[in-house]
Image (cartoon, grey):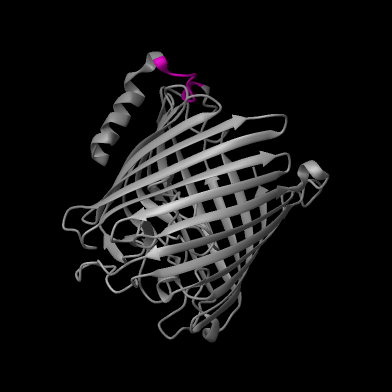
Amino acid sequence: MEPMKLSTLALSVALGLPGLASASDQSDAKGFIEDGSLNLLSRNLFWHQTGPGAHQRDWSQAFMLDYSSGFTQGTVGFGIDAFGYLGLKLDGGAGRAGSPNVPFDGDGEPQKSYGKAGGDVKMRISNSTLAYGDMKPDAPVFATADNYLVPQTATGFRLQSHEIEGLNLDAGRFTAGTGNTTTRHDGDLLASYAGVSSSAASYAGAKYEFNKQFNASFYADRLQDIWDQGYVNLDFTQPLADQQSLNLDFNLYRTLDSGSARAGQIDTTAYSLAAAYTLGAHTFTLAGQKVHGDEPFDYMGFGSMDAGNAAGRYGNSIDLADSVQYSDFNGPGERSWQVRYDLDMGSLGVPGLSFMARHIRGYGIDGSHLNADSAYYGAYGSDDREHETDAEAKYVVQSGPAKNLSFRLREAWHAGDASTGGHLEQTRLITEYPLNIF
């Protein structure tokens, strides 16, 4: 089903089945001012990466202010959302530029500061909200990223509805975006790996919670003149004995070129299955992932391919198990598997402290069958391999004046053929302090 047809169906279901609706959010509206909130997030990020021919290092600070109004009372409620983000370079020179945190010019000189601001207007009927403007959508086929210093945004329309108990509908049409290091609101919508831009993207989908143990999601999107993409997720959790459970998570993407096929021919199916066993504070995960097709699995990006901005273009529209800190393990024909261990120290007497470690190996990458007019042509060998090991430690202050202050250390060690990024080491140290002003 095409995205726009699915969008029309979503709207019809949302507004046409009041007999199945849950309690109305709009009927409980307290008012434009009364239900408003203003939040400030302070984020400090140290970045260090060594890799083939490059040594990136910077230290940066961001202040991110987000305001969300309530809705006016009545059958139809109106409101606004607004944001203002400021990024500051604290340290880092021209010889160490290139990260997705601090933009730099054509001469490799990093900017001392940058910022962006925007917002949207919104209206709500019953349990359905329609918004237009700059926002941060999070659909599995169209999701902006907040992985670095300042988040990405996208400009367009978005409809969200939960008129039926357990069913969430989501649809949107967007025409521009900003990357992590770009500030122009007329930035590009991109095929991340192809580096090809599109004038518009549309998506629609639904997530249904059958019960507390099982939910399913179905989405479709179109990146105009590049691809049509479908997505399925099935997530099941089976409680076992006391403090024990087993979770199975299956994700699948199907991508075909569409329109004028600006990135060339695309015919890929990518899927992953993860099984996670939780025993008290411990979680053990095994996962496998496969890309079928002569092209890599590609996904939405935002911003620009210009020097100084391209590093922050990759979005979060990839819900595959082996998409990790550095690599997505998404090369043409690539097969990968993962082992992972998580430890939550809360139940062991240290609330707020957690650890994670994982190892992923990918092999069978074969780009030798790509057409010469493909945007991916020449990027992959005929039998490429890669592997990555990640480790993470995080602590969140639980009480006192510094409550919710968090410290997070992320390490990645990657090795592989040139098509996968080669040998590199990446360190991120992130400190965040959220402040609710009202």
Q: Quadrant of the C terminus?
A: top right
Residue 120 location in percent, x, y? 41, 46
- The majority secondary structure of the magenta stretch comes to loop
Q: Which residues are magenta?
A: 20-27
Taking the magenta stretch, the answer to whether it contains residue 352 is no
Residue at 52% over, 49% down: 287
* Residue at the extreme top of the image, as rendered: 19
Q: Quadrant of the N terminus?
A: top left
Residue 221 can be seen, yes or no: yes
Residue 55 location in percent, x, y? 55, 81
Q: Is residue 50 above or below residue 70?
A: below
Taking the magenta stretch, the answer to whether it contains residue 21 is yes
- Determine which quarter of the picture holds residue 161: top left
Residue closest to the eye, 85 or 146: 146
Residue 156 location in percent, x, y? 34, 48
Residue at 55% over, 36% down: 33
Residue 186 can be seen, yes or no: no
Residue 196 location in percent, x, y? 28, 65
Q: Is residue 124 above or below residue 50?
A: above
* Residue at the extreme left of the image, as rendered: 260
Residue at 50% over, 58% down: 151
- Number of dots carrying numbers: 0
Residue closest to the eye, 187 or 350: 350
Residue at 78% over, 41% down: 347
Residue closest to the eye, 122 or 176: 176
